[in-house]
Image (cartoon, rainbow, N blue to C red):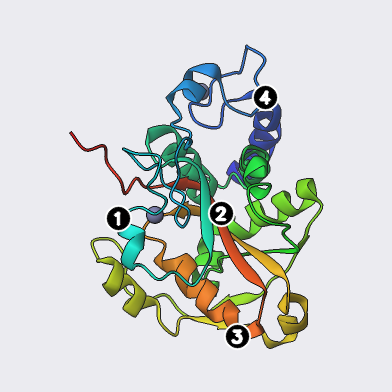
């Protein structure tokens, strides 16, 4: 009975309720989010790091943030819509653990403008999850966002990567440790090589933390010889705190 109800509930919630606070949206808003919550979202803009897409404080002449100077990411450039504070975190949590798969569509609508930041994207792909995670959540949130993004941007989406197993939990690990931990956990699906070769590829994920997962995905994807690899995420943790 509970399952049936939650299915109905999802249907009702699709059109009228804020993804973050769940309240009825009364004012006209462009996205599935009420004005109160929208105002709390910290959209990333201004002078951005050419690599990770973080805001750079200080002079406009700085093009790459301190952290990216030594990061050697396997992707060319990342763009994220907003910082991962309370409202985006709530939305992601509800999408991943609250069985609100339809949030992916609304998140993709918000992310659509990011796709145009890059040179012509030929193909979209996504960060894979292990079969264990997929079973737990019922879907891969990055895949769902990527599919919706592909639909609204009219770009084909390919299932290019496979997560073989989950490494140790990433929380609390440094970037170097995260990269080590992820090595060998992601595999390229051989049958898609031709769809990637010579193309500009965009890898989609929900959150950019240290960029280690996207780095690993991009390193693996390099084997298919794409032209350029870009990445985009809904939210991003802030690296470059303002200097006082
Ligand atoms: Zn709200
Ligand atoms: Zn950076």
| Residue marked by disc 2 | 232
- Which residue lies at the image location 65% right of the left edge and 30% below the top edge? 13
Along the line of sight, which residue is nearer the eye, 101 or 33?
33
In the image, taking residue 144 as reference, residue 131 lies left or right, namely left
Q: Residues within 10 Å of mark 4 (few under 14, many from 20)?
A: few
Q: Quadrant of the N terminus?
A: top right
Instruction: Determine whether the beta carbon of the residue marked 3 sits less than 8 angstroms from the nearest atom of ligand 2.
Output: no
Q: Secondary structure at mark 4?
A: loop
Image x and y of residue 140, in percent: 58, 60
Q: Is residue 48 above or below residue 118?
A: above
Location of residue 83 in the rendering, given as x and y in whole percent from the top left corner: 42, 40
Q: Is residue 212 visible?
A: yes
* Residue at image mark 3: 223
The local crowd at label 1, few if under 14, some if 14 to 19, many if 20 or more residues have their Cα within 10 Å, is few
The reply to whether the C-beta atoms of the residues labelled 2 and 4 are less than 8 Å apart is: no
Q: Residue at x 32, y 73 (%)?
A: 168
Q: CA distance from mark 1 to mark 2?
A: 20 Å
Image point 62% across, 12% down: which residue? 26
The answer to which of marks 1 and 4 sits earlier in the sequence is 4
User: Which circle's residue, 2 or 3, is located before the other in the chain?
Assistant: 3
Q: Which mark is residue 187?
A: none
- Indicate which disc residue 66 carries: 1
Q: Secondary structure at mark 2?
A: strand
* Residue depicted at x 67% and y 76%: 226
> Secondary structure under badge 3?
helix
* CB-based contact (under 8 Å), mark 3 and mark 1: no
Labels 3, 1: front one: 1
Q: CA distance from mark 2 to mark 3?
A: 20 Å
């Amino acid at each position: 009975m509970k399952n049936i109800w939650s299915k109905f509930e999802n249907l009702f919630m699709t059109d009228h309720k804020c993804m973050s606070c769940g309240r009825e949206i009364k004012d006209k808003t462009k996205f599935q989010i009420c004005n109160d919550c929208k105002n709390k979202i910290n959209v990333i803009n201004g002078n951005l790091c050419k690599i990770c897409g973080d805001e750079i404080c200080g002079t406009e002449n700085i093009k790459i943030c301190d952290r990216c100077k030594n990061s050697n990411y396997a992707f060319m450039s990342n763009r994220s819509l907003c910082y991962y504070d309370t409202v985006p975190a709530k939305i992601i949590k509800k999408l991943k653990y609250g069985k609100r798969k339809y949030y992916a569509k609304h998140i993709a609508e918000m992310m659509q403008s990011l796709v145009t930041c890059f040179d012509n994207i030929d193909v979209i792909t996504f960060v894979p999850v292990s079969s264990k995670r997929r079973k737990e959540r019922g879907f891969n949130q990055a895949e769902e966002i990527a599919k919706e993004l592909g639909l609204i941007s009219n770009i084909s989406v390919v299932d290019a990567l496979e997560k073989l197993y989950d490494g140790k939990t990433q929380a609390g690990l440094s970037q170097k440790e995260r990269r080590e931990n992820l090595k060998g956990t992601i595999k390229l699906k051989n049958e898609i090589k031709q769809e990637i070769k010579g193309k500009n590829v965009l890898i989609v994920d929900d959150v950019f933390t240290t960029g280690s997962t996207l780095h690993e995905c991009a390193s693996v994807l390099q084997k298919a010889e794409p032209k350029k690899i870009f990445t985009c995420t809904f939210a991003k943790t802030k690296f470059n705190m303002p200097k006082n």
